[in-house]
Amino acid sequence: MTGEFALIRRYFHPPTRHTLLAGGDDAALIVPQMAHELALSTDLLVGGQHFFPDMDPHRLGQKAAAVNLSDMAAMGATPRWVLLGLTLSSFQESWVAAFSQGFRKILDAHEVDWVGGDTTAGPLALAVTIIGEVPDGQALRRSGAHAGEDIWVSGTLGDAALGLDWRLGRCPDLAPAARDFALERFECPTPRVALGQALRPLASAAIDISDGLLADLGHLLTASGVGAQLELARIPTSAAQPSGPTDSDWQRRVLQGGEDYELCFTAPSSRRSQLEALGRAGTVVLTRIGRVTAAPEERFIQDEKGQSVAVSWRGYDHFAGAA
């Protein structure tokens, strides 16, 4: 049987690009660039809670890397280093090899060094810590939004939730092309790293959409002490969605579904032309969906007739219902 240390050497020691000392010692050594701040984030992904235990391991590796890169994108940071903690209920070398390949694929695409971590026996779970750099004073935060500014999102929303719905049997009649697209978005999200960096001189606040548009925008509004008015018809969705804005399932997926890993951000109205040009020039569409208001308690969504849409702004709560 392959031991833990042989496992680590074989699959968890890829070459590095900008690391003084990677895995193998008791700690990695990194050297940040001058005049840069470090951005650090960690995510815990538990089998049966955050992903289906039978998920393809290559895709799981991709998703584990992508969701952490998304945190760097939301801060406008350049991701540099990653550490991985992995618990496995049983050792299957083919599973570990596929997971490692998927994890490295996304990291390599963004030139991120995998510098260490830990493995142990236990229920399948992943703990990923990512470290990035951002020029001094230029990090995007949740607390910078001001009344009168525009609210924007990248990409389309609700696709990942549609993929989850299909896995749960909620939409069995979904067309094959729509199903495959939605599953791809659910299992292999695209972190908007380049966009986050481009937004540093343009956006006033930002957050990535992991728990749903309304929940995550709500976090940004709370941090900034402001409110929002959104236009339901402006919220961008893909052709894969089988229904429209008046449908409660559409609203649940698009407004509350989560795991989109798109960026939601605010910007002064004077930046509209620059942001529109950025969207045209880039690989992801940018859409203005509303405006920031001065009243922190105001969180209003209006339909095409100007009527309020009654929907909760709460997102996923891991401890909902817990004693």
Image: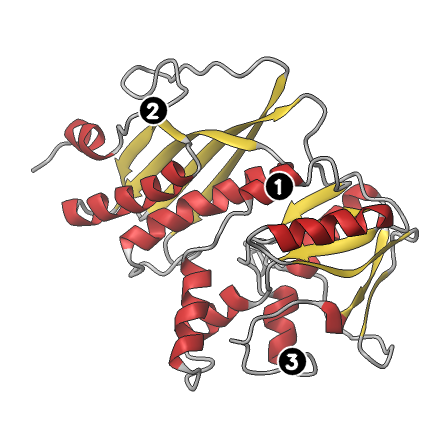
Instruction: Give the labeled residue for mark 2.
Output: 16
Q: Position of residue 270 (x, y in %)?
A: 86, 47
Report the disc number at residue 231.
Answer: none
Q: How far is mark 2 from mark 3, CA to CA?
A: 48 Å
Task: Tell me if label 2 and label 1 are in contact, CB under 8 Å.
Answer: no
Q: Amino acid at mark 3?
A: Ser
Q: Position of residue 251 (x, y in %)?
A: 65, 74
Q: Is residue 255 visible?
A: yes
Q: Is residue 103 above or below residue 152?
A: above
Q: Amino acid at mark 1?
A: Gly
Q: Nearer the viewer, mark 3 or mark 1?
A: 1
Q: Nearer the viewer, mark 2 or mark 3?
A: 2
Mark nearer the N terminus (3 vs 1): 1
Instruction: Give the labeled residue for mark 3.
Output: 248
Q: Position of residue 217 (x, y in %)?
A: 72, 53
Instruction: Give the labeled residue for mark 1.
Output: 196
Q: Is residue 110 above or below residue 15?
A: below
Residue occupying the point 65% across, 80% down: 248
Task: Tell me if label 3 and label 1 are in contact, CB under 8 Å.
Answer: no
What is the quadrant of residue 175 in the picture?
bottom left
Residue occupying the point 77% across, 54% down: 151
Q: Amino acid at mark 2?
A: Thr
Name the quadrant of the N terminus.
Answer: top left
Name the quadrant of the C terminus.
Answer: bottom right
Judging depth in this view, the residue of 229 and 295 nearest the camera is: 229
Judge from the rendering whether residue 68 lies leftward or rightward of residue 246; answer left or right.
Answer: left
Judge from the rendering whether residue 7 lies leftward or rightward of residue 54; answer left or right.
Answer: left
